[in-house]
Image (spheres, grey):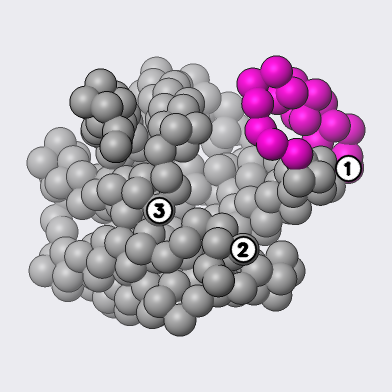
Amino acid sequence: MRTALLLTVVVLAGTAGDIMVTQVMKKVARGEQWTWRIAPHRVGRALARGQMWMGVGLMALAFFAFITVLSWAEVSFVVPATAANYIVGALGAKVLLKERVSKTRWAGVLLVAVGVVLVCAAQ
Amino acid sequence: MISKSLRARTNLFIVLVVMLNPLGNTFLRAGMNRTGAPPNWTAQALVIFFWRAFQSGSVWLGISLLLLFFICYMLVLSWADYSYVLPASAGSYVVVALLGSTVLGEHVPVGRWIGIGLICAGAALVGRTSPATEMEN
């Protein structure tokens, strides 16, 4: 039960953090071409936004939950189980970032989902 | 057409990505296994738990390897396609299971191996799609 709960935190907080950071990076990029010269300015603009820090905080929460679950669960189980972030990430990208997710990508996500279920069932 | 040196550099970084991430996670597991699970979920118990965890050399080695992985991953993405890097790096799920079973002595049942195979296949399929939605026209 505690394993399932913490893995849920790892996947949800990690993916939410990823999505928040992606949203901020897309906003600060403003469609400009990436160059090494403008990289520090872009990172600076990103760090000035509260949403960026919320995203980093969620990623930190995911990391602490990850190392906590590793204190009792096997790494060969925990790491593949966190591949569930492919599923949550695709849903988040579709709903929150309004990205177009192709049928092929959904098929890939479905395969990952079946794989994660098998990994968890074999625990 | 990409040059031989660029291909060699990309392959080198893919190997680094596929090795560093599972190695980092394996060292984290080794360190956390020695730390042991928190006895309860009070704030005080958790502070002591993380304090003990961050005194472990294995945990710091794991974190260092994961930071190196992150740098290699970002670097390879700066010249190689995401759609190439994503499926290629999915091999790390296989490596982590191999390291878990050989180095840490974990028992990996057949069902888990099949699941890991499906995750790799799914990641490869995701990797075949365009990395940017505006390119999918």
Q: Are marks 3 and 1 on the same chain?
A: no
Which residue is under mark 3? B83
Residue A41: x %, y % from top left: 80, 24
Which residue is under mark 1? A50
Q: How many marks?
A: 3
Circle 2 residues within 10 Å: few <14, some 14–19, many ≥20: few
Task: Read off the chain for label 1.
Answer: A
Q: Amino acid at mark 2?
A: Glu
Task: Read off the chain for label 2.
Answer: B
Nearest to the observer: residue A59 or residue B48: A59
Q: Are marks 3 and 2 on the same chain?
A: yes
Q: Amino acid at mark 3?
A: Ser
Report the residue at 69% width, 36% height from top: A33
Report the residue at 70% width, 75% height from top: A95
Which mark's residue is nearer the viewer, 3 or 2?
A: 2
**Magenta segment includes B136:** no
